[in-house]
Image (tube, rainbow, N blue to C red):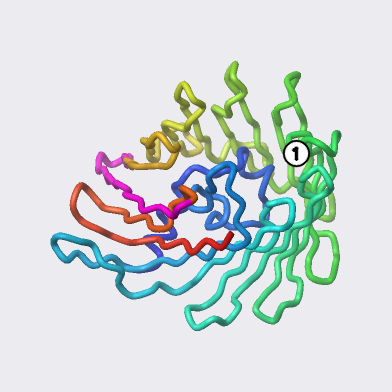
Amino acid sequence: MKRTLALLFVLFLPSLFAPRAVSAPLLPEEYTSEVAMIKPGTYPKLMVIKYFDAIDKGLEVAVGAPQESVYEIRYNEQHLPYRFSEYTTSGDLKEQYDRTYNTNGVVTAETKRGADRYVKISSEYTYENPKQAKTMRSQKIYNGDKNLMYTETYQPDKKGNISSSRRVNAKGEVVYSYEYAYDDHNNLIRETRINDKGNKVSEQEHEYGDHKELLSDNVYNAQGKLRFRNEYTYNDKGEMTGMTISNADGTMEVYRMQYEYDPQGNWIRQTTYKGSKIPVFIIVRDIEY
């Protein structure tokens, strides 16, 4: 089992931030998917996330060889994640993301550093109401020399949800844009990506349950043809216990997750199976409170 399978799988997981393009533009999905979910009312100082091959020993599934990277999330005194680091398994830094918040706990800036610890990309955010993250109206993205690369602007609908976003480069030329639609409960139900020519590139549709949990994603190409459909199931803690990927060619992949927990109720080991019996990888979370 290669590392790419585990991380590609993570890309399919629902993001903790939606729309993804609005809320966490710099952070990779490894830090924003359900892999980083924490039980409400628990306050970690540090979380280390490790991926391993899974070894089927019949009556148990053992942790196998570690995969290529270790991910670390550090939390500030507001109990908010502020530093996200990726290391090699030998402990060498690969890249690091730092996040700054205002006194209301709303993100105001992010930076990405490389292995040399120099800033490669940074971003700054402005809000209509600095107490509410959903009122973000613009972000500016800079390169390591602090030269402006892109500006993204966000337009709200009458309920305050982001209805559209647009990215332009330093010359003011449109790079791409998004249009968003919501249901009566303010759940994001459709995302449409549009290229610089004004043509639709792709579209996603989302369905939700009675508790606002994401039940399915449909992903379409520019012609409106279904590329794949993801369906999700959860336990009573809100953690994903199953995912079914249905591809356009009629093939299907079914995954099932099992968890082990620490005394605070946060999961510390997730074992993912393909089908009902084949273990494919294990995620271990070391959480310090």
Query: Seen in the image, is 231 located left or right of residue 197?
Result: left
Task: Kindly tell me whether residue 111 is visible in this rendering.
Answer: yes
Residue 134 painted magenta:
no
Which residue is at the front of the view, 187 or 285? 285
Task: Kindly tell me whether residue 140 is visible in this rendering.
Answer: no
Indicate the secondary structure of the residue bearing disc 1: helix
Which of the image's four quarters has the N terminus? Answer: bottom left
Q: Residue at x 46, y 21 (%)?
A: 210
Q: Amino acid at mark 1?
A: Ala
Whole-percent x, y for residue 124 in the image: 82, 53
Q: Residue at x 32, y 68 (%)?
A: 53
Query: Seen in the image, is 45 located left or right of residue 241?
Result: right
Which of the image's four quarters has the C terminus? Answer: bottom right
Residue named by callout 1? 133
Q: Which residues are magenta?
A: 246-263
Residue positioned most to the left: 58
Whole-percent x, y for residue 60 in the image: 20, 61
Above or below, 246 relative to 85: above
